[in-house]
Image (tube, rainbow, N blue to C red):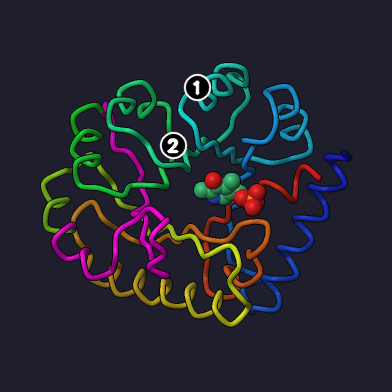
């Protein structure tokens, strides 16, 4: 595994995707999802020049956060979070990508010592196995979130089905983009909705084409 070579290949592919989408001047944040490797390999990857680290499990997130303390990094919790674990982790998180229930938002409000940047996870493809709000639930959810001022909703996060075709990916990701723009236009308090977290190793080209501002890449760094 040549981390520098993988990192360079991933970033080059991202630049190509941005160019193809006429987004060369825009910033796309690349989150290295390090759930496949230990803290030592994570450090080696950081040395190649990645700036954002993503983990999907609270215990591993905390281990790595401690192991890499002292290195200026941006920390992303990308996986579903159980309510009882919010107090252990939420104040160390720079971005939480998987806000998928009002009860979870209420717990974050209760435990947060600062505003917490969150993405609302939306289930655009309506896969039963996927977490996230259905679009038709969102109005009621936004109403509830209005009183939770420590939950700063920076945008939407979505995941496409594993086996989706290029056309299906384009359709899901453009629907997410259109929804994000509609929500941003409402200028709701503490819910700017300016960001879009979508795209993984297998589908970041389509996600960038549709306007992703954060992509979450694991496998491609560690092959
Ligand atoms: C694992 C994971 C990723 C990265 O997926 P790869 O296919 O390995 O790039 C992105 N987002 C979430 C929520 C994940 O759990």
The residue located at (59%, 23%) in the rendering is 64
Query: Residue 150 placed where, x, y %?
Result: 23, 39
Quarter of the image holding residue 47? top right
Q: In the drawing, what numbered circle is on residue 54?
A: none
The residue located at (40%, 41%) in the rendering is 80
132 inside magenta stretch: yes
The residue located at (54%, 23%) in the rendering is 65
Quarter of the image that includes the N terminus: top right
Q: In the drawing, what numbered circle is on residue 94?
A: 2
Magenta span: 112-141
Quarter of the image that includes the C terminus: top right
Quarter of the image holding residue 106? top left
Mark 2 lies on a secondary structure that is loop
68 inside magenta stretch: no
Q: Where 90 sits versus 1, above or below?
A: above
Q: Is residue 183 visible?
A: yes
Q: Nearer the viewer, mark 2 or mark 1?
A: 1
Residue 151 appears left or right of 67: left
Tag 1 residue: 62
């Amino acid at each position: 595994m040549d981390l520098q070579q993988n990192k360079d290949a991933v970033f080059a592919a991202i630049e190509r995707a941005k160019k193809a989408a006429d987004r060369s001047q825009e910033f796309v944040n690349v989150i290295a999802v390090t759930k496949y490797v230990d803290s030592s390999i994570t450090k080696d990857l950081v040395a190649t020049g990645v700036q954002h680290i993503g983990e999907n499990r609270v215990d591993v997130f905390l281990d790595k956060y401690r192991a890499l303390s002292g290195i200026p990094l941006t920390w992303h919790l990308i996986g579903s979070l159980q309510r009882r674990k919010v107090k252990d982790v939420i104040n160390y998180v720079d971005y939480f990508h998987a806000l998928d229930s009002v009860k979870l938002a209420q717990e974050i409000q209760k435990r947060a010592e600062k505003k917490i940047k969150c993405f609302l996870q939306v289930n655009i493809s309506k896969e039963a196995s996927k977490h996230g709000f259905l679009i038709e639930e969102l109005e009621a959810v936004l109403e509830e979130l209005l009183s939770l001022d420590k939950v700063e909703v920076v945008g939407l996060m979505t995941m496409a089905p594993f086996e989706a075709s290029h056309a299906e990916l384009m359709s899901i990701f453009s629907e997410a983009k259109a929804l994000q723009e509609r929500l941003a236009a409402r200028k709701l308090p503490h819910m700017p909705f300016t960001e879009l977290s979508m795209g993984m190793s297998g589908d970041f080209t389509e996600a960038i084409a549709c306007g992703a501002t954060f992509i979450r890449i694991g496998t491609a760094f560690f092959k």
